[in-house]
Amino acid sequence: MKKILFIAAIIGLSVTARAQEAAKAEGPKIYNPAADAKAEIAAAVKTAEVQHKNVLLQIGGNWCIWCLRFNDLVTKDAELNKYMNDNFVVLHVNWSPENKNEKVLADLGYPQRFGFPVFVVLDSKGNRLHTQNSGYLEEGKGHSKAKVMEFFQGWAPAALDPKSYVEKEKAK
């Protein structure tokens, strides 16, 4: 009887482990390990130039729960999503064992030093403006909507446009 219970427990654990692996494999796939990050960044910069936006690179991987949580917040919260898409061309850049994009990340100043996700803001010419450690945007088991919005507002094109400040001074 003990052997039967032991075998049933082993089978049960095996089935549970396989179900968890399947659920993990079926999770959202926002990062593409096979993508040519250098070419995608160049295309995002061209789009940003035409649309008068900056580029927001979200660097991480499908394995990263914090990367998925951030993406979930900014895609499901209507206010964040609108502000982000009105001001940035957004690109997910993969970092995983399959593709660490070492050359691209070296060109971006090694943002992976902050962990994942990490955000890099480029202007519409492809110049790196800022690297954001996502830890400063966290709150509890996710990211703070207010902190994320402040980050977006601080690096949106209008925040970096000298005309914005000249107009504010004239209004005083």
Image: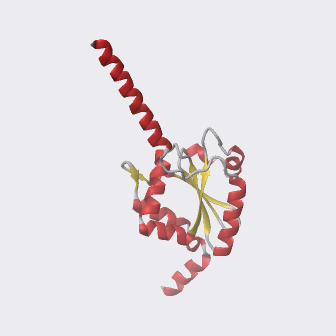
Front in this rendered view, residue 94 or 172: 94
Which of 161/62 is in front?
62
Q: Residue at x 70, y 52 (%)?
A: 36
Place of residue 70 in the rendered image (x, y in percent of width and height, measured from the top left)? 47, 54
Residue 47 picture quarter? bottom right
Residue 14 in which image quadrant:
top left
Q: How many marks?
A: 0
From the viewer's side, name the closer residue of 82 and 5: 5
Q: Is residue 101 left or right of residue 146?
A: right
Residue pictured at 40% horizontal, 51% vertical: 142
Where's residue 157, x and y in %? 59, 71
- Residue 130 position (above or below residue 32): below
Q: Residue furthest bottom?
A: 171
The location of residue 129, given as percent across then percent down, is: 63, 61
Image quarter where the N terminus lies is top left
Q: Residue 64: percent from the left, percent from the top?
A: 50, 44
Q: How is the image coloured?
A: secondary structure
In the image, residue 97 above or below residue 166: above
As drawn, 167 above or below 117? below
Question: What is the residue that sits farthest to the left in this orientation?
Answer: 1
